[in-house]
Image (cartoon, rainbow, N blue to C red):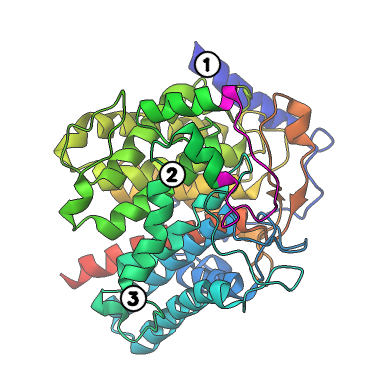
């Protein structure tokens, strides 16, 4: 019965998309490439024009490198004085794409393409260094604040993911595929910088330690005195006692920001057994011998799955905002397969991997039901008459592509849906590779009108990140095909 009602809801949404019934912006009709019969609707190897993933990804990375530091993702406002999570997510996506492009060039024996892909990686490493040297400036022309630990604002989790870029650099710099890159710092320097963020995100501090650190002149750049309330302390202590991050808020975005940092810490330390020992928590004892950063990410992901899951496989924005916001669900749609590919073959995580795979497949089924006739998704997923939002749509597209690549999803059904979505996203991609119709940064709110009225922007790094992830996954599929043919 529930599934029948879901289908009725989707059909109602489609009806409301008829002319005169939708609040969608007036845009030219999307016309996908004509299928000549040479490829199937589910083929994720052959694309035309701007949709060709290797070229598209290359241009998306170049665009990311040339834009200034954003203002919480927005490039149409004066830059923030520090690097925040939307830019970091795009940064990671740019690295992942460039690394897939290196593999693509090596598989094809194309030395020029390999040099170009290595150049992209160099530009991303340069951008990281430019934050510290002052070459990448804030909108005021001042150097960016580079140490984002112990900021006193409530959204600390949005700053801590900054450590993930250094950790990613540390995880790849010893690979001979990347010989010739100028890394600027030693692996230990990158590792130590990033691990300070990853460790601080989970360490069980005392109330006195929190107050002292937040008010330290080393970290408190705004000179606003911080005094932790009893309510905050009780909440934070509860999470810490149970082995979760004290930054846990049960907002859907935070699940990705916490797990992404911890998973990057895992990637940088997985070959060092000294990182398998965890600190002591009052109500949680680590019983496996797995890397502690991966273990943290797994248990944090499980907590979010249990606490903010709504009906039919989708997730609330937060425990108090019961709406299926597209980009919020996008963080779950991306986060689950990223983690699943790390743990599915580890026996210690058999139960968690089974849960994760089931919840991921349930979510993908729901997203398939709510995919709009244009191939994308609405700002509120289950209100299909609402305007199309591209950052969440790109994230869902990535989740479909990744599921097909890994064999977790039906290739014909989800491959066709992914291809339709990727081609549709091209309509929103400007000639300079800025994606349009990206919802601005959005706090949780229990109001339909709140989400409907949110501003929309172009080139926002929330959207650029999703596009880069899609280009990466499609390039990886192309690489798999080349490798298979070569055998």
- The residue pinned by badge 2 equals 201
Secondary structure that dominates the magenta span: loop
Q: How crowded is mark 1: few (under 14 residues within 10 Å), some or many (20 or more)?
A: few
> In this picture, which residue range is highlighted in magenta?
214-232
> Could you tell which of marks 1 and 2 lies nearer the N-terminus?
1
Provide the residue designation for mark 3. Answer: 186
Which residue occupies the foreground of this view, 487 or 461? Answer: 461
In the image, residue 230 lies in the stretch drawn in magenta: yes
Tell me the SS state at disc 1: helix
Q: Which of marks 1 and 3 is nearer the N terminus?
A: 1
Residue 269 located left or right of residue 234:
left
Q: In the figure, is residue 89 to the left or right of 145?
A: left
Q: Which mark is residue 56?
A: none
Question: Can residue 51 be found in the magenta stretch?
Answer: no
Query: In screen coordinates, is 86 left or right of 3?
Result: right
Q: Residue 16, percent across and down?
A: 74, 30
């Amino acid at each position: 019965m529930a599934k029948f009602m879901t289908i009725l809801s989707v059909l109602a949404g489609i009806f409301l998309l008829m002319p005169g019934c939708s609040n969608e912006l007036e845009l030219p009709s999307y016309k996908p490439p004509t299928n000549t019969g040479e490829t199937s609707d589910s083929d994720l190897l052959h694309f035309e024009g701007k949709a060709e993933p290797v070229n598209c990804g290359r241009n998306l990375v170049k665009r990311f490198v040339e834009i200034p530091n954003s203002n919480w993702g927005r490039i149409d406002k004066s830059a923030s004085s520090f690097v925040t999570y939307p830019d970091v997510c795009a940064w990671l996506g740019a690295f992942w794409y460039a690394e897939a492009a290196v593999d693509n060039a090596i598989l094809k024996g194309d030395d020029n393409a390999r040099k170009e892909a290595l150049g992209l990686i160099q530009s991303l490493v340069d951008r990281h260094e430019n934050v510290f040297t002052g070459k990448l400036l804030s909108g005021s022309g001042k150097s960016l604040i580079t140490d984002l630990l112990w900021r006193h604002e409530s959204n600390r989790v949005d700053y801590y993911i900054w450590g993930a870029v250094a950790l990613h650099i540390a995880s790849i710099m010893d690979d001979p595929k990347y010989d010739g890159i100028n890394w600027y710092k030693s692996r230990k320097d990158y590792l130590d910088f990033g691990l300070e963020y990853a460790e601080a995100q989970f360490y069980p501090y005392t109330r006195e330690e929190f107050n002292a650190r937040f008010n330290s002149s080393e970290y408190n750049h705004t000179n606003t005195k911080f005094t932790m309330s009893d309510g905050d302390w009780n909440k934070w202590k509860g999470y810490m006692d149970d082995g979760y991050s004290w930054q846990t808020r049960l907002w859907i975005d935070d699940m990705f920001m916490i797990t992404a940092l911890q998973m990057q810490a895992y990637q940088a330390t997985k070959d060092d057994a000294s990182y398998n020992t965890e600190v002591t928590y009052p109500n949680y004892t680590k019983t496996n011998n797995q890397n502690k950063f991966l273990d943290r990410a797994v248990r944090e992901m499980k907590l979010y799955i249990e606490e903010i899951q709504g009906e039919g496989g989708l997730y609330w924005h937060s425990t108090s905002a019961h709406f299926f916001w597209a980009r919020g669900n996008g963080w779950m749609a991306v986060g689950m397969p990223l983690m699943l590919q790390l743990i599915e073959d580890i026996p210690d995580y058999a139960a968690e991997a089974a849960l994760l795979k089931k919840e991921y497949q349930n979510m993908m089924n729901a997203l398939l039901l709510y995919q709009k006739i244009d191939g994308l998704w609405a700002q509120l997923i289950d209100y299909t008459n609402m305007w199309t939002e591209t950052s969440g749509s790109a994230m869902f597209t990535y989740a479909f592509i990744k599921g097909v690549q890994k064999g977790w999803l039906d290739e014909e059904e989800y491959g066709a849906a992914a291809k339709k979505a990727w081609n549709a996203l091209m309509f929103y991609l400007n000639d300079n590779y800025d994606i349009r119709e990206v919802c601005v940064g959005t706090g949780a709110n229990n109001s339909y009108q709140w989400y409907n009225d949110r501003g929309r922007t172009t080139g926002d790094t929330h959207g650029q990140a999703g596009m880069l992830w899609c280009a990466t996954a499609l390039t990886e599929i192309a690489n798999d095909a080349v490798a298979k043919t070569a055998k």
